[in-house]
Image (cartoon, rainbow, N blue to C red):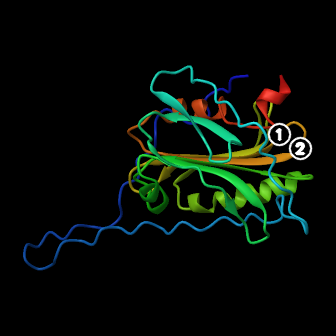
Amino acid sequence: MFRTPLLRSALVVVVGLGTAALLSGCFGPPAAPAETPKPTPDFGAIGGDETPVPIETGTPIEPVEPDDAGFTSVVDDLGVLTVAVPDDWTDVNGLPFTTDAGQEWASISVSTDIQGYLDSWSVPGLEIAATATSGVTDDDLIGLLDSITEIYASCETVVKQTSPYDDGVFTGYESVFEGCGSSGTSAFAITATNPAGTQAVFVRAQITSDLDANEIYLAAVNSFDTTLGRAQSK
């Protein structure tokens, strides 16, 4: 089931604050605006009960070749996750991570420059992660969404916030933002579960204004999958 575009085609350009000094020789050049540090998500109790649930790796997931030219599919190191991204996003980290509660998440970070994506608004990129769970509530998904979107608190426009998400397989919540940073970057985030409720997944991305935000959003939501997701629902 294909999703309809949610990101606006016209991105809001944020004009940098501050007034340039006009008196020659009186002042030095204005300091470059500092980017707001991005907080680390709090994964709370998602999948991390008193006894963490191990990820079911099994047969590695098989990515579907993207329909759109200019996109490619990436897979995490455990073979649990896949998603389609622009084919020039060649900096890929597919290593899993473990939360403080001891819960392992399969994970992919992908960008033209992952460190630049993590540190600033001027580099596009996407993160997706999934974990096994014995049950996730709506409050759990909303709490995770709130946590992974704290980094977007400085964005100028909230297009959608904690809206129901349903792509025919994964269900949960999503938020969409525009005007992030001084370059007018847009962003979205999704937290959801697979049909059986045995995996929780999140996706978040930032898309710089020189790219087609709707195209990248649709490519991601129509392709992201887990080993217990779309393939099992057919």
Asked if residue 120 lies left or right of residue 166, the reply is left
Asked if residue 147 lies left or right of residue 12, the reply is right
Q: Amino acid at mark 2?
A: Gly
Residue occupying the point 41% across, 42% down: 209
* Quarter of the rendering containing residue 121: bottom left
Q: Where's residue 162, x and y in %? A: 74, 49
Residue 194 is marked as: 1
Q: Which quadrant is home to the N terminus?
A: top right
Q: Is residue 138 above or below residue 69?
A: below
Residue occupying the point 39% across, 69% down: 34
* Quarter of the rendering containing residue 173: top right
Residue 168 can be seen in this image:
no
Residue 26 is marked as: none
Residue occupying the point 61% across, 54% down: 95
Q: Secondary structure at mark 2?
A: loop
Asked if residue 53 lies left or right of residue 207, the reply is right
Q: Where's residue 203, x and y in %? A: 65, 46
Q: Where's residue 5, x and y in %? A: 61, 29
Residue identifier under label 2: 197
Asked if residue 200 lies left or right of residue 85, the reply is right
Q: Secondary structure at mark 1?
A: loop
Residue occupying the point 15% across, 78% down: 27
Q: Which quadrant is home to the C terminus?
A: top right
